[in-house]
Amino acid sequence: MHLLFQVSIIIFTYMIVVFLIAWAKKDNSIVDIFWGLGFILIAAFSLVRSETIDLHKILMNLAVLSWSLRLSISILARNWGRGEDFRYKAWRDTWHHFVIRSFFQIFILQGLFMLIIALPVYFVNSASAVELSPVDFLGMSVFLVGFTFEAVGDYQLKLFKKNPANKGKLITTGLWSITRHPNYFGESLIWWGIALFALDYPGGWKTLLSPVILTLLLRFVSGVPMLEQKYKGRPDWEAYKKKTAAFVPFMKFL
């Protein structure tokens, strides 16, 4: 509980700083760049506090580091010079008492979700040393599949948008032919894989709350629904939607 309190203070201090930067730049979408970096901060803090550092912890923290850096760098490169993302701009244009509401509904709320999703990270880092088990190899395998979906999906989208002939079109090839959101699906798998590292410890099953919450958010709240709202009503989108799974590849009902 003491570690949870400390991590909470760090996260919410971090998100206040990010809010102040966003306020100064008039661009709340930079929170997406700082999202991944926040997990590096949590991992580093909890690992430094750890009484023991073993291969089990090293592997999990390397997984978190690689995901965090790739995600933040990818979003930074994609958004560089483009201004505020359309979703955040829509809120800026329609919300009353925008500054206060954005502080709580964007930054503090994301800080709360960061605290929940990072649960396996500081849980494992605060635990005693253990040897690697088959569950850890399963976790790393799930992580790598998720990382591949997220990274390859983003790369395929980048190449698609780079071609002038594709302007205004939807990407429906590669991983995007089996799921409408390979990057979101990949991120969900990544955190299922990370959470599996906690199952070697008593009570570690409780950290499965992390991937459950993240998956629900991506699939039903802030991921898929918000992004797809942009394309609603387009004939090409509706046709693509009918034949392609929203989240889990090949499973149209998911």
Image: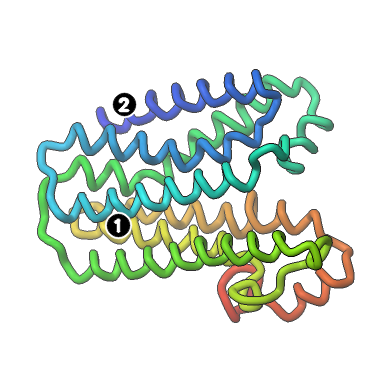
Q: Position of residue 208 (x, y in %)?
A: 37, 56
Q: What kind of element bears circle 1? A: helix
Q: Is residue 142 left or right of residue 216?
A: left
What residue sits right under mark 2 in the picture? 6
**Residue at 25%, 59% in the rendered image:** 199
| N-term-proximal mark, 2 vs 1 | 2
Residue 162: name its quadrant: bottom right
Q: Position of residue 217 (x, y in %)?
A: 57, 52
Q: Decide which of 91, 75 is in the foreground and name it.
A: 75
What residue sits right under mark 1 in the picture? 205
Q: Quadrant of the C terminus?
A: bottom right
Distance of mark 2 from mark 1, alpha carbons? 22 Å
Label 1 neighbourhood size at 10 Å, few (<14), some (14-19), many (20+)?
A: some
Q: Position of residue 159 (x, y in %)?
A: 64, 64
Contact between marks 2 and 1 (CB within 8 A): the answer is no
**Residue at 88%, 63% in the rendered image:** 233
- Give the residue type that dot 2 points to: Gln
Q: Is residue 73 left or right of residue 115?
A: right
Residue 167: name its quadrant: bottom right
